């Protein structure tokens, strides 16, 4: 990181009471501030970071990026004053990007971004030779998160891995222009954030804008089992590596997907065994493997590293309990990921296994939300799931439109008790907990796992 006066110059800000300090990190959440961090006071729809300046400095911040210096005491050191702190953060990240000499990989898609990034980080981290991999913290994939992830990448890192998310048209283009990636991975195209995009075609165009911004000497890795990506592959400005379980030059075959994943790849020949579950995760594994091969990882190293992967929390992760297993898929939900998780639930365990589905609503699906919820409920019934417990207005409404013997509608405060009652006397029950992030169903998982 640069000294405070150079940071102020890079963002076009005015430095008040500078003392020549060099920050160790850039942080936007005062609760995460450590000694020596530079705190960025962002104004959001729910909170204004300026209200947490005192807390940030109490935790050890060495300075702050602000748009209203009056919110700090008169003796506060190292205040960089700008008109717009978010714009300044992005300018700082852009200046840092120009100094990075490593290969930057941007990952986008309707599903699987975080798992694909985590897989790729894991297999690349065993490459040896002292070349480091910078993996973006958490899923920092927004106009705030991506600049922070870029600023966390060391100049010495050989490879940087980043996610790009989108809620509305133009988001991916904005993030890609900031990231300036050398490689793009597009994991899937499906119905997600339809409140912002309206149609899946619009989602596809949005994700494709990442590929459109690649340099001629870059490359894209595409899931061409998605018809949209199969059609677009021929329009890319650079080389494309096409990947799929049914289509593509790099083809995978699922040998087993429950209770762990085994995938055979013909070219290059590999047998990948990984502690993930589900066919949709087979695609994530295949995308990560194909990308890693292009980045110089040998098939032998890939096979070895895949076996030791640690699944990402809250993304279809098995959690042992007194009554059996919870499949914790609480990070988020859309129709494609819900269908994939249900397929895993149906296969998990033996013929005497009792299976339950905590059906959390899938938000941001636009005018077709009712249809998507009805289809997931119908799928659960077709798969013979023993118990379905809806959470959230849209999931409950779907269950009332299509009542079935398996459906139990209970109040949220007694949901954990209802699940335990369903599994009472069982030691091989499996409970899938799946829903949109805002439902905070991870709290239910923690309660059931106690």
Image: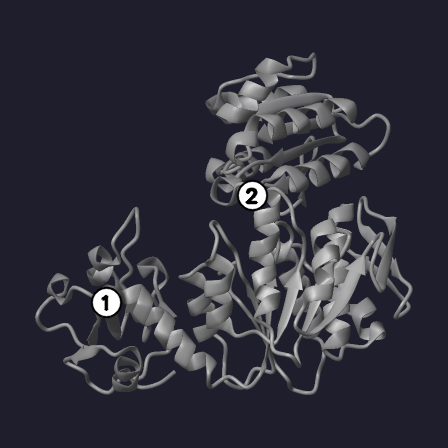
Crowding near the residue tagged with mark 1, few <14, some 14–19, many ≥20 C-alpha atoms within 10 Å? many
Q: Quadrant of residue 92?
A: bottom left
Instruction: Name the one closer to the observer, 219 or 318.
Output: 219
As drawn, which residue projects farthest toward the left? Answer: 74
Helix, strand or loop at disc 1?
helix
Q: Position of residue 237 (x, y in %)?
A: 65, 72
Residue at mark 1 to residue at mark 2: CA–CA distance: 34 Å
Q: Can residue 252 be seen in this view?
A: yes
Q: How many labels does the image show?
A: 2
Helix, strand or loop at disc 2?
loop
29 over 414 or under it: above or below: below
Q: Where is residue 211 in the image (x, y as percent from the top left)?
A: 62, 66
List the residue tagged with mark 1. 57
Q: Which mark is residue 332?
A: 2
Q: Residue 109 carries which label?
A: none
In the rendered image, which quarter contains the N terminus?
Answer: bottom left
Q: In which quarter of the image is residue 326?
A: top right
What's the residue at 77%, 74% (across, down)? 293
Q: Position of residue 427 (x, y in %)?
A: 74, 29
What's the residue at 80%, 45% (across, down)? 259
What's the residue at 68%, 21% (across, down)? 387
Horizontal side of 440 relative to 200 (left or right) equals left
90 over 278 or under it: above or below: below
Instruction: Name the one closer to the observer, 145 or 309.
Output: 145
In the rendered image, which quarter contains the C terminus?
Answer: top right
Label located before the other in sequence (1 or 2): 1
Q: Where is residue 124 in the image (x, y as percent from the top left)?
A: 69, 73
Q: Tell me the mark number nearer the camera, choosing from 1 and 2.
A: 2
What's the residue at 58%, 83% (across, down)? 102
Q: Quadrant of residue 145?
A: bottom left
């Amino acid at each position: 990181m640069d000294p405070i006066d150079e940071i102020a110059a890079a963002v076009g800000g005015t430095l008040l009471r500078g003392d020549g300090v060099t920050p160790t990190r850039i942080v936007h959440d005062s609760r995460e501030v450590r000694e020596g961090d530079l705190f960025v006071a962002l104004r959001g729809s729910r909170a204004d970071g300026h209200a947490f300046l005192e807390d940030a400095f109490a935790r050890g911040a060495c300075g702050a990026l602000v748009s209203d210096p009056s919110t700090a005491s008169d003796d506060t050191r190292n205040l960089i004053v700008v008109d717009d702190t978010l714009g300044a953060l992005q300018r700082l990240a852009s200046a840092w990007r120009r100094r990075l000499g490593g290969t930057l990989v941007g990952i986008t898609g309707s599903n699987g971004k975080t798992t694909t990034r985590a897989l790729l980080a894991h297999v690349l981290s065993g490459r040896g030779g002292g070349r480091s991999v910078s993996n973006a913290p958490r899923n920092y994939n927004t106009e705030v998160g991506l600049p922070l992830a870029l600023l966390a990448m060391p100049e010495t890192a050989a490879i940087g891995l980043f996610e790009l998310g989108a809620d509305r048209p133009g988001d991916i283009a904005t993030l890609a222009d900031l990231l300036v990636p050398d490689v793009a991975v597009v994991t899937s195209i499906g119905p997600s954030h339809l409140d912002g995009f309206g149609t899946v075609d619009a989602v596809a165009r949005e994700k494709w804008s990442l590929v459109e911004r690649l340099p001629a000497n870059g490359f894209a890795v595409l899931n061409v089992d998605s018809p949209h990506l199969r059609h677009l592959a021929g329009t890319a400005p650079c080389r494309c590596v096409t990947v799929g379980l049914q289509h593509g030059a790099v083809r995978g075959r699922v040998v087993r997907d429950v209770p762990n994943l085994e995938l055979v790849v013909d070219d290059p020949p590999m047998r990948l065994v990984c502690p993930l579950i589900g066919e949709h995760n087979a695609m994530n594994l295949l995308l990560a493997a194909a990308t890693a091969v292009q980045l110089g990882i040998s098939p032998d190293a890939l096979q070895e590293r895949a076996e030791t992967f640690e699944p990402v929390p809250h993304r279809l992760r098995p959690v042992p309990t007194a009554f059996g297993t919870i499949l914790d898929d609480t990070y988020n939900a859309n129709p494609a990921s819900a269908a994939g998780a249900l397929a895993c639930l149906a296969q998990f365990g033996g013929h005497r296994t009792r299976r339950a589905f905590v059906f959390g609503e899938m938000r941001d699906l636009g005018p077709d939300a009712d249809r998507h919820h009805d289809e997931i409920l119908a799928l659960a019934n077709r798969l013979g799931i023993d118990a379905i417990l809806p959470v959230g207005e849209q999931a409950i409404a779907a269950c009332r439109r299509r009542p079935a013997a398996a459906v139990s509608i209970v109040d949220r405060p007694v949901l954990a008790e209802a699940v335990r009652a369903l599994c009472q006397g069982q030691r091989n029950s499996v409970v899938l907990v799946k829903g949109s992030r805002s439902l905070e169903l991870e709290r239910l998982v923690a309660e059931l796992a106690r």
